[in-house]
Image (cartoon, grey):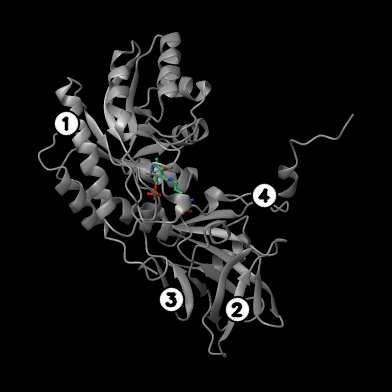
């Protein structure tokens, strides 16, 4: 919990609003975000890096709601995108094309064309065939594409294997040993302009040392390029800083920045970072209601109205999210598995949680602002949750709950 989510008179609040009031007004499940928490996290970043020229590119995949993107755009953020869809979201939210970096291993021609049309800051290119395709697309449009190569530094991020990206065996980036040759190839292509170098080693890192190890490898390569006459304007060191879900002790934003700035000492390139989780993770909760309390033979279950389609992280990564009662009770505490209505055993939100609750109570699944709504689905034909943003005592519905007819509107019966 942080200062933006707190109990007052035994009622869990976000900023100045009781979560129960939001549930009554908008129903459950719903995501609730704190604008102040978003702003605070962003400003901590901006403050921590202010001693050098930098651009904070929010990783849109962490949470792509337009209102969230708009909050960051107003604060001056850039954006890290991985699809044409995310590009259109950023523009719709008022983000500047000139502050967008485009990552991802599978960019299509159409996505490249769109990004070239609007004039993004940089393509983070992840393979040799992607270089060739981008050069051809840019040529056909009479444009020059600004590029970085995403270099795979072969550094162990020491995080969950599904979200570790900087090892040789991962699909991401170009091999460290081939990067120099590929940079030379890129520099010789008529419609590319080499502007930077990029690297991202993984997500939810709770230690600074892999970031430093990766930065050092990147810098060694920057020096090799310079010796070959290729001079870079920016270094993009990716995202990945972890947050506290449970008992993790990730470095603070300030310490993380200090470590990166230390590694970059004496370098003049502009620094780009691509934080996702750390800007939004602890700025949002998933609000849900207990439909039933069920005593099984071995376990007690709290069956809630949110499920793995709303928050996939526990099912996919065995991720831990704290679960707090919206209203504190003095009644006895029991241990429950908190599960959703979906027909899969993997449909759990949390296991073995000690809680004093009754049927009908509401729960807040904490630290759900990152990779919650953005990874949600319609599995079991469940409409996706509403999203609410609180700003002081003001409440904004920033995404209406889906309805079932929307879910099959594009489907057709046979003739
Ligand atoms: N840049 C690139 C190129 C990335 O692939 C990612 C995340 C980021 C930046 C932002 O990383 P962050 O600062 O959020 O750690 N769904 C998973 C996380 C997947 C991360 C994918 N890439 C989860 O729920 O934990």
* Contact between labelled residues 4 and 3, with CB atoms less than 8 Å apart: no
First in sequence: mark 2 or mark 1?
1
* Residue 14 higher or lower than 8, as above or below: above
Q: Residue at x 59, y 54 (%)?
A: 386
Q: Which residue is mark 1?
A: 223
Q: Position of residue 14 (x, y in %)?
A: 44, 66
Q: Which residue is mark 3?
A: 7
Question: Of marks 3 and 4, which one's residue comes earlier in the chain?
Answer: 3
Q: Tell me the SS state at disc 4.
A: loop
> Disc 1 and disc 3: Cα gap in Å?
53 Å
Say which mark, if any, is on residue 53.
none
Q: Is residue 96 above or below residue 37?
A: above
Mark toward the start of the polypeptide (4 vs 1): 1
User: How far, Cα to Cα, is label 2 from label 1?
Assistant: 56 Å
**Residue on which the image places disc 2:** 336
Give the class, few, some or many, for how many residues have Cα within 10 Å of label 4's Cα (few <14, many ≥20). some
Instruction: Identify residue for label 4.
Output: 378
Q: Position of residue 320 (x, y in %)?
A: 49, 66
Mark toward the start of the polypeptide (2 vs 3): 3
Q: Is mark 1 within 8 Å of ligand 1?
A: no
> Label 4 CB, ligand 1: below 8 Å?
no
């Amino acid at each position: 919990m942080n200062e933006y989510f707190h109990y007052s008179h035994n009622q869990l609040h976000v900023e100045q609003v009781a979560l129960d009031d939001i549930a009554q007004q908008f129903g459950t499940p719903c995501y609730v975000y704190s604008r102040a928490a978003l702003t605070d996290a962003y400003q901590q970043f901006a403050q921590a890096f202010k001693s050098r020229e930098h651009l904070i590119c929010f990783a849109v995949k962490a949470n792509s709601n337009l209102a969230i993107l708009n909050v960051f755009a107003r604060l001056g953020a850039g954006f890290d995108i991985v699809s044409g869809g995310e590009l259109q979201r950023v523009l719709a939210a008022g983000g500047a094309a000139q502050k967008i970096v485009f990552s991802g291993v599978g960019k299509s021609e159409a996505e490249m064309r769109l990004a070239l049309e609007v004039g993004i800051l940089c393509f983070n290119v992840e393979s040799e065939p992607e270089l060739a395709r981008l050069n051809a697309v840019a040529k056909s449009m009479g444009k020059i594409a600004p590029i970085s190569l995403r270099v795979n530094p072969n550094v162990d991020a020491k995080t969950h294997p599904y979200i570790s990206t900087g090892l040789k065996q991962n699909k991401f980036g170009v091999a460290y040993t081939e990067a120099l040759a590929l940079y030379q190839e890129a520099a010789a292509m008529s419609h590319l302009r080499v502007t930077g170098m990029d690297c991202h080693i993984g997500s939810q890192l709770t230690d600074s040392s892999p970031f430093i190890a990766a930065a050092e490898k990147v810098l060694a390569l920057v020096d090799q390029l310079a010796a070959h006459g290729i001079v870079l304007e920016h270094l993009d060191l990716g995202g990945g800083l972890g947050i506290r879900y449970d008992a993790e002790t990730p470095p603070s934003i300030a310490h993380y920045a200090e470590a990166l700035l230390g590694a970059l000492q004496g370098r003049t390139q502009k620094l780009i970072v691509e934080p996702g989780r750390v800007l939004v993770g602890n700025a949002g909760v998933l609000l849900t209601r207990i439909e039933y309390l069920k005593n099984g033979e071995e376990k007690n279950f709290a069956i809630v109205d949110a499920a793995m389609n709303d928050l996939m992280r526990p099912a996919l990564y065995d991720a831990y999210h704290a679960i707090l009662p919206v209203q504190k009770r003095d009644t006895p505490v029991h241990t429950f598995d908190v599960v959703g209505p979906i027909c899969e055993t993997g449909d759990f939100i949390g296991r073995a949680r000690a809680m004093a609750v009754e049927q009908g109570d509401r729960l807040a699944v904490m630290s759900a602002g990152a990779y919650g709504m953005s990874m949600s689905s319609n599995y079991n034909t469940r409409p996706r949750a509403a999203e609410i943003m609180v700003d002081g005592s003001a409440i904004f519905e920033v995404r209406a709950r889906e309805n079932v007819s929307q879910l099959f509107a594009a489907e057709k019966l046979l003739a």
